Image (spheres, helix red, strand yellow):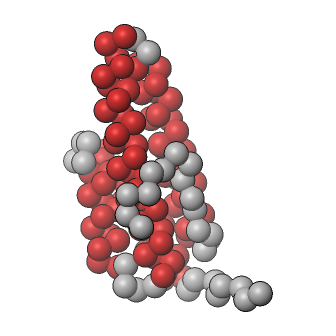
């Protein structure tokens, strides 16, 4: 059994930035959470397999989250969407922070509830 080598510091930094770039949603609401990780991933995906993997993971989660948020917004008309949006927001914040920290430590993070759009 072979063990994958630990990613170098630069690779870990770019992988963490792939996740943390989702905070661009505070600058560009709605699509910033997708555009931020997408830009970082497209620029650095060829640097290493770790950056490529974590970039795809971040983008897939952000697209999945956007779909969940739109469904929750529609459900606001029957009031169940309001607590769902609050829970989704808290979940999103925690997951992005945990993923960023894991990637900076060289640990490949897998988001729960993420739909694999980009393989």
Q: Quadrant of residue 2?
A: bottom right
Q: Quadrant of residue 107?
A: bottom right
Q: Quadrant of the C terminus?
A: bottom left
Instruction: Name which residue lies at 39% across and 11% down.
Output: 79
Residue 37 drawn above or below residue 14: above
Residue most toward the right? 1
Percent coordinates x, y for residue 5 in the rendering: 64, 87
Percent coordinates x, y for residue 72 in the rendering: 37, 26
Residue 72 drawn above or below residue 91: above
Say if residue 13 shows up in the picture: no
Instruction: Name which residue lies at 44% across and 57% down.
Output: 116
Instruction: Please name whichever residue, 81 or 86, is drawn nearer the observer in this view of the structure.
Output: 81
Say if residue 100 shows up in the picture: yes
Instruction: Please name whichever residue, 84 or 17, is drawn nearer the observer in this view of the structure.
Output: 84
Instruction: Name which residue lies at 47% across and 34% down.
Output: 88
**Does residue 98 appear left or right of residue 4 in this picture?**
left
Instruction: Please name whichever residue, 1 or 41, is drawn nearer the observer in this view of the structure.
Output: 1
Residue 84 drawn above or below residue 79: below
Instruction: Name which residue lies at 34% across and 17% down.
Output: 76
Percent coordinates x, y for residue 15 in the rendering: 47, 71
Q: Quadrant of the N terminus?
A: bottom right
Residue 23 drawn above or below residue 107: above
Instruction: Please name whichever residue, 95 or 119, is drawn nearer the observer in this view of the structure.
Output: 119
Q: How many marks?
A: 0
Percent coordinates x, y for residue 26 in the rendering: 30, 45
Q: Quadrant of residue 34?
A: bottom left
């Amino acid at each position: 059994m072979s063990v994958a080598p630990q990613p170098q510091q630069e690779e870990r930094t770019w992988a963490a930035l792939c996740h943390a770039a989702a905070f661009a949603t505070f600058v560009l609401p709605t699509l910033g959470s997708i555009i931020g990780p997408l830009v970082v991933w497209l620029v650095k995906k060829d640097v290493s397999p770790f950056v490529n993997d974590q970039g795809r993971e971040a983008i897939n989660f952000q697209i999945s989250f956007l779909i969940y948020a739109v469904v929750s917004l529609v459900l606001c008309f029957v009031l169940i969407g309001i607590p769902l949006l609050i829970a989704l927001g808290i979940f999103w914040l925690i997951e992005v922070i945990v993923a960023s920290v894991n990637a900076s430590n060289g640990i490949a993070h897998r988001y729960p509830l993420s739909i694999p759009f980009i393989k």
